[in-house]
Image (cartoon, helix red, strand yellow):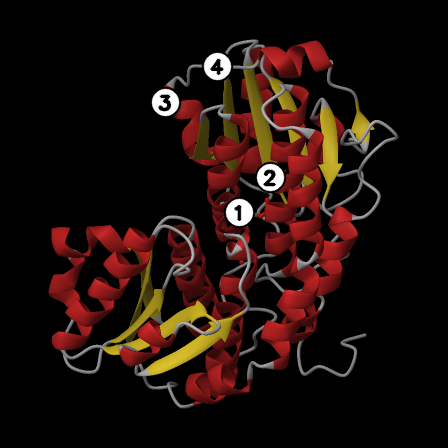
Amino acid sequence: EKGGFASFMDKEIHDQPAAVADTLRGRLDAQGRLKLDEGVVDEYVLKSIDKIIVIACGTASYAGLAARYAIEHWTRIPVEVELAHEFRYRDPIVSVKTLVVAISQSGETMDTIMAVRHAQQQGATVIGIVNAQGSTIAREADAVLYTRAGPEIAVASTKAFVSQITAGFLLGIYLAELRGNKFPDEIDALLSELDAIPAKIQRVLDTAAPIREVAASMANERTVLFLGRHVGFPIALEGALKLKELAYIHAEGFAAGELKHGPIALVEQDQPVFVIVPSPRGRESLHSKVLSNVQEVRARGARTLVIAEEGDTVAAQHADEIFYVPAAPVLMTPLLCVVPLQIFALELAAAKGYDVDQPRNLAKSVTVE
Ligand code: M6R
């Protein structure tokens, strides 16, 4: 059932092109509107919402952070992303004009369930982005958009993560169209860019030998840092979480712009630092700012492991190791950049002889608060 892979996690990493493609498939009705899988939310309600709050835990919360840039850009609705276990305790400002999006692979995460109930009590509409059919969050939400990742067995979430981001994009596109922010041809263009993502993930998988080799040689590292900016920031957080979970190595993800406000003090000789470099085709200033960060840490002795867009020869000049991902619209690049980091954590943990499917101290779904 591992399909010839050494672990469920490795299999699930390789399932990602299909998970994204399946999450995208057959989503639009005859009018080109998104079909929710279960439940109905009145279009009038969706037209009148003035805020979206994403609630989730762990990797699912990083999916929310990654999707937020696109949802805000396409809809112009403010999006907050809040850890579910923090949400209830800060007296959140929620009203009938708030759309709460609960993201959960299992649909059984107690922290997220309690946050959903709290939001509903305040009058919010809740849409679940859920993988497990018929789970508690799927049942309790007003409507569900299922991620069609299939069963995820490994404790570390991989294919659910990319499917959650994809579902977040679909929701954003839907809201944008519904509220008249985007015209049909713009929607078509976004959807066809999304349709091209699975083949691009496949390409990352097919060219992953270098990251596997580097990871296997790093079993003795004690700490690894991850830097990202804009959509790369949540991916830095996710890369660090994967490494903590699987390889039991201290790891931190930082917003690259934050480096000079403190974290750069951590950098010493041979410190491995992953940097997710934005596309040079995006905002030029971001590309050059993150490359300056690469130079700053390298000047202090860091070993720089750079993830960059294919053809980015400037990034290659500042990298000790470079891993390329295919070009894609900037807002969709999290779906590609996360893959080398998943593989890195998997291979490093395997090199240490750890059980990558069942890391110590962790459960697949956290059903207690
Ligand atoms: O089932 P959920 O998506 O609600 O789970 C949320 C987190 O517990 C989960 O993503 C956790 O962080 C994973 N172990 C990460 O790999």
Tell me the distance, in whole angstroms, between the alpha carbons under discs 3 and 4. 11 Å
Q: Nearer the viewer, mark 2 or mark 1?
A: 1
Relative to residue 287, is residue 159 drawn left or right?
A: right
Q: What residue is pinned by disc 1?
A: 63
Does mark 2's beta carbon lie closer than 8 Å to ligand 1? yes
* Nearer-the-camera pick, 16 or 249: 16
Q: What residue is pinned by disc 3?
A: 90
Mark before the other along the chain sequence, 2 or 1: 1
Question: The disc labelled 4 sits on which kind of residue?
Answer: Val
Question: The disc labelled 1 sits on which kind of residue?
Answer: Ala
Mark 4 crowd level (few <14, some 14–19, many ≥20, 10 Å Cα): many
**Residue 129, image x, y percentages:** 66, 38
x 11%, y 63%: residue: 265
Task: Tell me the tag on residue 94.
Answer: 4
Question: The disc labelled 2 sits on which kind of residue?
Answer: Ile
Does mark 3's beta carbon lie closer than 8 Å to ligand 1? no
Relative to residue 331, is residue 198 drawn left or right?
A: right
Mark before the other along the chain sequence, 2 or 3: 3
Mark before the other along the chain sequence, 1 or 4: 1
Tell me, yes or no, whether the two marked residues, 2 and 1, touch with CB atoms within 8 Å.
yes
Task: Tell me the tag on residue 242.
Answer: none
Image height of 275 relative to 335, above or below: below
